[in-house]
Image (tube, helix red, strand yellow):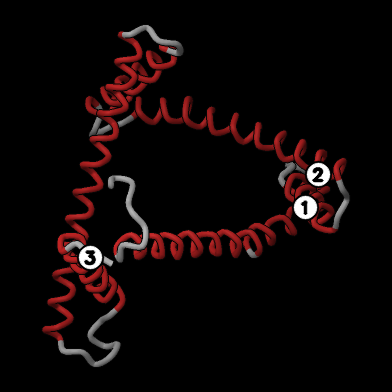
Amino acid sequence: MRVRLGAASSSALTIGIGLIIILGLLLTGDDLNLPDGFVDLVGAITGIALKVVTITVALMFLVGVGNMCLVHLRRIIGRKKGAIYSVFLLGSFMLALATYATERDDPQTSMVLFETVQVSVESALAGLLFFALVYGAYRMMRKQVTWSSVLFIVALLIVLTGALPFASVKTIGEIRDWMLAVPVSAGARGLLLGIALGTIVTGVRVLIGVDQSYRE
């Protein structure tokens, strides 16, 4: 198997910096009786690497925003299908940007826009999620009744009923709060751990040459 020197060097450099950052974030001078000079050196390298990553992510965000504006601007100029949505998107983006730039010290208008637009959109999406869950439960019970579907229906009814602002459902509300605090929180953390492990495995496979990145 042929190994390219550039790819091997970049992989070794990336893995080395990653290990140093992990050590800098996890280790302190009191953990393993490490020398203070070594801990300070690793901490300094970690701080510089994190600053570089922060700047890179900010630049990538700016490039993504610029690309979004160019794509929608070309759609408007070319009068393509759906150009009216591009007009609203660019108009709202420029309005939010101008509002934030002119009211950096006292962003009252920005907060009004956030509360009247963003919160309203999120509330509408939450309402649609309610109907989607109920319809999904109906389709599930209509297709086949299993223990998993019955458990899903019971959990759905407890969560939805416990969210009602009535004193008669106080006990159900307490059960709902326990479900959100224990099983749901544990499941969410499990998903986050799975995402983190999957990201690490994918990155390692790309670095060692098992998989190829999309840019290649």
Whether tag 1 and tag 2 are in contact, CB under 8 A, the answer is: yes
Sequence-wise first label, 3 or 2:
3
Q: Position of residue 179 (x, y in %)?
A: 69, 60
Determine the secondary structure under disc 3. loop
Gap between marks 3 and 1 measured at Cα: 51 Å
Determine the secondary structure under disc 1. helix
Question: Badge 1: few (under 14), some or many (20 or more) residues near its Cα, within 10 Å?
Answer: some
Drawn side of residue 75 relative to residue 28, left or right? right
Note whether 169 is above or below 136 in the view shown.
Answer: below
* Residue that carries the numbered disc 3 in the rendered image: 3
Sequence-wise first label, 3 or 1:
3
Q: Nearer the viewer, residue 5 or 121?
A: 5
Q: Quadrant of residue 186?
A: bottom right
Q: Position of residue 18 (x, y in %)?
A: 26, 68
Q: From the viewer's perspective, is the residue at label 1 or at label 2 nearer?
A: 2
Question: Badge 2: few (under 14), some or many (20 or more) residues near its Cα, within 10 Å?
Answer: some
Whether tag 3 and tag 1 are in contact, CB under 8 A, the answer is: no
Question: Badge 3: few (under 14), some or many (20 or more) residues near its Cα, within 10 Å?
Answer: few
Q: Residue 140, which numbered label? A: 2
Determine the secondary structure under disc 2. helix
Q: Position of residue 27 (x, y in %)?
A: 28, 80
Task: Give the residue type that dot 1 points to.
Answer: Phe
* Residue that carries the numbered disc 1 in the rendered image: 152
